[in-house]
Image: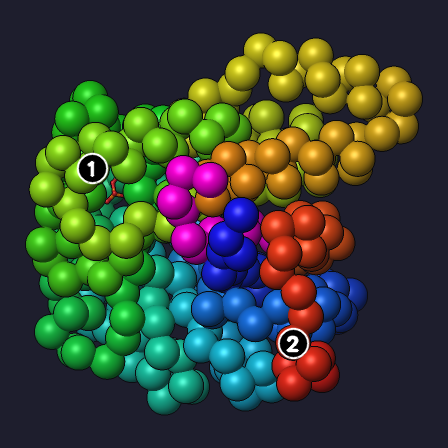
């Protein structure tokens, strides 16, 4: 099996305790020489400054590329572009450009009166700046707002046409979801890289709830598997083996990069990476 390259998503800390968790995560995962760390942007733009600060410190301490997430929610175009410029000043090299989810749990996204109306407009504006590698979201099990899988893929194509360099997918539970989507994207003429987003499951109940919200298909056998594992206190073992199997199946099908949603809990991600042959490089072993 070929060893894949990896990248890691973290979220910005909101407390001192959470800061320690983030730096532990960086310390544990940077030695695996990721392509980049990405730092999320709180729903509704709520972590604008925290994302900036976490991305800045991660970049400075790890010297690795850092991708800051940026959404269109709750801000004017001028404010959003100012955030992007400040990311650039902080050494951020890459942006994950997103529309974002509606504020306050609303069902439908409503743009800010002076804001970007959708992700395509944001991507176009960032591409004009010519300062960042631009990544975007992609949805193998279809985004809940898309009227069909065809529309979902056509929209992804529009994001690439607007200047995106690469897509990272929402998480999914079975390799077929991604492989089918990859084939459909290729058939639609998409040639840019689509990187599978991998969620190592630290808590099945929350992973399941999150999957329901974002339209990820939940295989019936997973409920049964986690019920049995919880009974026997073996959920970590189950998660490690399921996640390793999922990643191996993707690598066997020619996938060369994987993006892990770490939730600032590095253990599972690190164990899966090691099982895939991604081993620590001593030169990066002291980052934080
Ligand atoms: P888009 O791809 O722009 O839209 C989603 C779908 O809606 C499209 O597939 C399309 O079918 C339909 N659609 C949207 N607009 C139009 C239109 N104008 N015309 C026709 N169809 C349209 N959220 C956060 O708040 N913070 C984060 O840090 C964050 N990070 C993420 C990272 C990744 C890798 C992913 C996959 C998601 C992330 N999200 C984050 C969640 C994301 O904000 C939501 O999934 C949001 O609902 C969609 O954002 P998007 O830019 O991917 O949507």
At label 1, counting other C-alpha atoms closer than 10 Å, the crowd grade (few under 14, some 14-19, many 20 or more) is: many
Task: Give residue 70's quadrant in the image.
Answer: bottom left
Percent of width and height locating residue 68:
41, 68
**Count of picture labels:** 2
4 w.r.t. 279: above or below: above
Decide whether residue 172 is among the magenta residues. no
| Badge 1 element | helix
Q: Quadrant of ligand 1?
A: top left
- Front-most of 56 and 42? 56
Q: Which residue is mark 1?
A: 185
Q: Is residue 260 magenta?
A: yes
Q: Is residue 98 visible?
A: yes
Q: In the rendering, at what x and y percent does residue 245 appear?
A: 60, 34
Q: Is residue 73 visible?
A: no
Residue beneath the point at 36% across and 88% down: 89
Up-down: is 228 above or below 16?
A: above
Q: Please say if 168 is above or below 203.
A: below
Front-most of 154 and 44? 154
Please report the residue visible at 49 percent of the width from the left and 26 percent of the height from the top. 174
Residue displayed at 63% across by 18% down: 222
Quarter of the image with the C terminus in it: bottom right
Question: Dot 2 corresponds to which residue?
Answer: 281
Q: Which residues are magenta?
A: 252-262
| In this rendering, position of residue 17 left or right of residue 215 | right
Mark 2 lies on a secondary structure that is: loop
């Amino acid at each position: 099996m070929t060893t894949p390259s990896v990248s890691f998503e973290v979220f910005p800390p909101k407390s001192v305790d959470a800061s320690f968790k983030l730096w532990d995560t960086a310390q544990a995962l940077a030695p695996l020489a990721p392509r980049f760390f990405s730092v999320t942007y709180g729903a509704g733009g709520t972590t604008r400054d925290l994302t900036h600060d976490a991305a800045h410190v991660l970049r400075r301490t790890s010297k690795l590329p850092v991708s800051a997430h940026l959404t269109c929610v709750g801000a004017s175009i001028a404010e959003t572009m100012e955030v992007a410029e400040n990311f650039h000043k902080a050494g951020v090299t890459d942006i994950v450009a997103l529309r974002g989810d509606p504020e306050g749990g609303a069902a439908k996204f409503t743009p800010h009166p002076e804001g970007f109306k959708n992700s395509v407009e944001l991507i176009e504006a960032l591409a004009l700046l010519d300062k960042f590698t631009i990544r975007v979201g992609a949805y193998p099990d279809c985004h809940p707002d898309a009227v069909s899988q065809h529309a979902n893929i056509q929209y992804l194509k529009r994001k690439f046409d607007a200047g995106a360099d690469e897509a990272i997918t929402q998480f999914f539970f079975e390799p077929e979801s991604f492989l089918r989507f990859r084939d459909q994207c290729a058939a639609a003429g998409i040639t840019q890289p689509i990187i599978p987003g991998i969620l190592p499951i630290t808590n099945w109940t929350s992973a399941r709830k999150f999957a329901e919200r974002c339209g990820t298909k939940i295989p019936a056998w997973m409920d049964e598997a986690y019920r049995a594992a919880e009974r026997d206190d073996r959920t970590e073992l189950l998660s490690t083996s399921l996640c390793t199997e999922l990643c191996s199946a993707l690598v066997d099908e020619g996938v060369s990069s994987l993006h892990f949603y770490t939730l600032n809990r590095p253990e599972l991600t690190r164990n899966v990476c090691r099982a895939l042959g991604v081993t620590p490089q001593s030169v990066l072993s002291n980052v934080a």
